[in-house]
Amino acid sequence: MVFITKFARIGLQAARQLSVTPLGAVQARAIHLTSLLAKERRYTNKHEWVEVVSGSNAIVGISSYAQEALGDVVFAQLPEPGTELKQDDECGALESVKAASEVYSPVSGKVIEKNAEVEDTPALVNSSCYEKGWLFKVDLKNPKELEALMTEDQYKAFLSSSGDH
C-alpha cells in the first residue's frame, strides 16, 4: 500500500508496471518516469521552477532555458535554511562567465535546505538543472500559489511565443 501511495502521482498503472518489472527494465524506464514527473513542475516567467516532492515540501531550481541563457555558471549564492520567503522575493544569485542573474522564489515559504553541492560546484546547474542542480527546498506556506504558475506545456508555449524572455 505504501508503494502505491508513493506512486499515486504517476498513476496506478505505472506503479503496477514498476512493481512487477525486473530491475534492468526499471532502469530503462527511468527516462520515461522522469518525463512523467516533469509535467508536475511549475514554472515562472522568470524561469524558476518548483516541484512538490512530499506534503508541503518543494524543490526550487532554474529551467534549462535559464541555464542555457546564463552560460557556464561559476558562482551560486543560495538562501540560508530558516529564511522566510514570499512569492517573487529575490533570494539568491547565479553568476556565469557572461552574466549574472538574481534568483526569485516562485512560492512563499520557509527555506528548509539549500543545495550546498551547487554552491561548491555551480556547474551542476548547467549539467543537471532538474536533478542535481536544484537550488533550495522550501516548506510551502501557501500551496495555492502553485496554481498561478505555468505547467510544463504552458511554459513551453511561453518560450515559443515572440518577445524577450
Image (cartoon, helix red, strand yellow):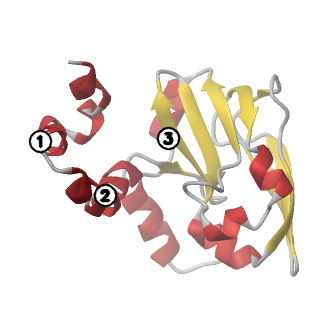
Task: Name the side, left or right, on which 19 lies relative to 39.
Answer: left
25 sits to left or right of 90:
left
Residue count near mark 1 (Cα–Cα under 10 Å), binned few <14, some 14–19, many ≥20: few
159 lies left or right of 110: left
Could you tell me if the residues under marks 2 and 3 are in contact, i.e. CB atoms within 8 Å?
A: no
Residue identified by numbered label 2? 27
Callout 3 environment at 10 Å: few (<14), some (14 to 19), or many (20+)? few
67 displayed left or right of 55:
right
State yes or no: discs 1 and 2 in contact (Cβ < 8 Å).
Answer: no
In the image, residue 147 above or below residue 164: above
- Residue 56 position within the rendered picture, expressed as x and y whole percent measured from the top left: 53, 22
- For image coordinates 29% across by 35% down, the residue present is 9
The residue to which callout 3 is attached is 148
Q: Residues within 10 Å of mark 2 (few under 14, many from 20)?
A: few
Q: Position of residue 54 (x, y in %)?
A: 47, 26
Residue, x 17% and y 38% (percent of image)? Answer: 19
Report the front residue among 113 and 156. 113
Quarter location, residue 114? top right
**Residue 4, position as x, y percentages in the image:** 21, 27
Residue tagged 1? 20
At 86% across and 75% down in the image, what residue appears?
99
- Between disc 1 and disc 2, whose residue precedes? 1
